Amino acid sequence: MTRQELVQQIQQKKSYLCVGLDTDITKIPSHLLQEEDPVFAFNKAIIDATADFCVSYKINTAFYEALGIKGWLAMEKTVQYIGKSHLTIADAKRGDIGNTSTQYAKAFYEALPFDAITVAPYMGEDSVKPFLEYQNKWTIVLGLTSNSGSKDFELQQMGEQKLFEKVLTTTATWGSPDQLMFVVGATQADSFTAIRKLTPSHFYLVPGVGAQGGSLKEISEKAMIPGDVGLLVNVSRGVIYASSGTDFAEKAREEAIKYQQEMALYIK
């Protein structure tokens, strides 16, 4: 999915919601465990309920890999079911020496038809470049994350910049804003104004709104790009686990609508 197509969806739907399909088989409604593929049955119902109100789905691969081949198959069926209507993100946090990253890129862009993948930049340019070689695909680089451990490395001072700022400014030179996004956690709201100055044209994938306490209003005010919006705000648990009963899809839809309606107020 190109940037133009993504922006068009955002403007049409008045939404920059990304629904996180962090599907934990121990948390899905118990009646689905009777299904042949409980994880896919859950995902399909969530997608059907929320598709009109979001522009992206993020699949955290760990929850699927933990189930072995059955989980991998559920992930493949899920991304195939979403199709081309929404930006599909493999939240895999890959990144290794060049020839290994090349294989990761093939896995998620060719064997699996994802539009985007999250990448850890710690090993430098040659570990990220293979992902950037694909046309109309997005490489989403970890920048400033929402977890408490971000202080251990990301927020450490390196001369005049913090480490995460160095990551942002350096990585931004490896590709264009049409193919590079950054992960910036919503719980780091105080940093968004400065981050936007460092990377004025890039999209941000923003986790941490909802269950982790990040403010959608604050993030939107500080980081939105007029016209393009430049934000994908991910909500996982707050949508997909809105109910543990047979009404789980209906409740997920209600939560997605709430986020979409609030986002419509902020879109410039």
Image: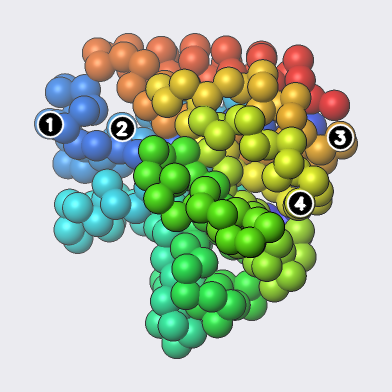
Mark 4: few, some, or many residues within 10 Å (few <14, many ≥20)?
Answer: some
The amino acid pointed to by label 4 is Leu
The amino acid pointed to by label 3 is Pro
State the image coordinates of residue 162 (x, y, percent, origin top left). Answer: 60, 54
Observer able to see residue 90: no
Vertical side of 205 occupied by 162: above or below? below
Distance, label 4 to label 2, CA atoms, is 40 Å
Residue shown at the point (75%, 24%) measured from the top left = 221
The amino acid pointed to by label 2 is Phe
The one nearer the camera, 146 or 153, is 153
Mark 3: few, some, or many residues within 10 Å (few <14, many ≥20)?
Answer: few
Could you tell me which secondary element the residue under label 2 belongs to? helix
Vertical side of 206 occupied by 107: above or below? below
Q: Which residue is mark 2?
A: 42
- How many numbered callouts? 4
Dot 4 or dot 2: first in sequence order is 2
The one nearer the camera, 235 or 187, is 187
Observer able to see residue 65: yes
Residue shown at the point (42%, 26%) measured from the top left = 212
Could you tell me which secondary element the residue under label 3 belongs to? loop
The one nearer the camera, 172 or 229, is 172
State the image coordinates of residue 139 (x, y, percent, origin top left). Answer: 59, 62
Could you say which disc has been placed on residue 198 in the image? 4
Is label 1 or label 3 in front? Answer: 3
Q: How is the image coloured?
A: rainbow
Could you say which disc has been placed on residue 226 in the image? 3
Dot 1 or dot 3: first in sequence order is 1
